[in-house]
Image (cartoon, helix red, strand yellow):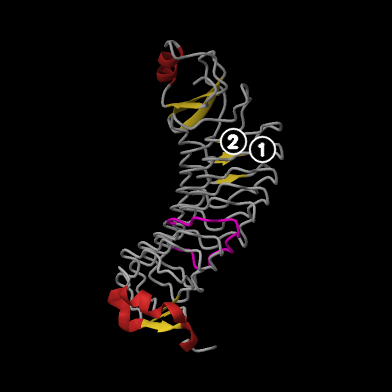
Amino acid sequence: MSKYLNVFNTLSEYQAFSASTEYTTPNVALVKETNVLYYDYGDNKPQVDMSSYKGEFQESSVGGNYYGNSAITKINYIPSGETSLNYIFQNWSSLKEVTCKIPDSVTSMNYTFASCSSLINAPTIPIGVTGMSYTFASCSSLVTAPEIPSGVINMNYTFSSCSKLVTAPSVIPNSVTRIDYAFYYCTSLVNAPVIPSGITNMSHTFYKCTSLVTAPEIPSGVISIEYTFSECKSLVNVPPIPDSVEDMDSAFYQCSSLKELTLLPATPPSVSNGLSRCPIESIYVPDESVDTYKTATGWSQFADKIKPLSDKPTE
């Protein structure tokens, strides 16, 4: 616990904590009195204004996440040599900006800025980072996503519930293998990024992206798109569903603008609730599979909409 930065409302609250059995010398203890933030290095004497965070660091830690941190508005110092920012700065609800460079030594940023609900601009991600699970999750003021370095592997939940996010990264690197829930509930997102070829599962990736107009091309190795575009109410255009897809459960649930769908799998994917409340007019499937789709579970209700791929108008 001592490796984390802590915020206390009063000096007496801090003194009580420092006398407890939980206490060992903290990196930085913060005391908030009359809306002014002070710091203390363990002598129970508040020092100077700390509304812009700059601290001394020990035990390979650069902050904390469990004890409030609600008064910090700016991060202007992160020490060089740090390799992991996992869980650091999480839940700093007043944090608006990061004015310093994140050190190139950092390789992991899982949960780093999660629930920083006042953060508007994301900092540049170091090129050596490989883990970005939940990094900006629930950053509800974030407008533009940073570019993703080429070595990142895990992007599960990275931008989930970033409700003001308008601009996604232009490209998600081919190194990324996990993207479940990555843009979940990004209700302002209009354009989706290019999806890397190594992805096999896209569960809930764009769930409730209600402003999304065009779906990205789904890589040929993806086997599941369950809930991927569920409740994307502005979605009009969808590239052909690749023949590798086996699971489409609730994939397009309540996509109330979607009128056409093209599927390349010869065997109908599972589709429970997949097209519920969609004004589908045409479903194009491989010519040899038309009858199979028309009698398949979940697809038979759309039998009059199912047409051979050879009948699809060319643009």
Tell me if residue 167 comes above or below residue 19 in the rendering: below
Considering only vertical position in the picture, is 41 above or below 73? above
Q: Is residue 265 within the magenta segment?
A: no
Q: Residue at x 54, y 19 (%)?
A: 26
* Image disc number at residue 106: 1
Q: Are marks 1 and 2 in contact (CB under 8 Å)?
A: yes
Of 219 and 207, the residue lying toward us: 219
Circle 2 Cα neighbour tier, 10 Å, few/some/many (<14 / 14–19 / ≥20): many
Q: Who is closer to the viewer here, 33 or 168?
A: 168
The residue pinned by badge 2 equals 85
| Residue stretch in magenta | 188-204
**Callout 2, which amino acid?**
Leu
How far across and down, in percent of the image, does residue 98 sit? Answer: 60, 44
- View extreme (left): residue: 301
Identify the residue shown where x is 54% and y is 13%.
43
Q: Main secondary structure of the magenta part?
A: loop
- Residue depicted at x 28% and y 75%: 301
- Percent across and percent down for residue 242 are 51, 68
The answer to which of marks 1 and 2 sits earlier in the sequence is 2
Q: Write down the quadrant of residue 56 in the picture.
A: top right
Residue plotted at (61% across, 28% down): 55
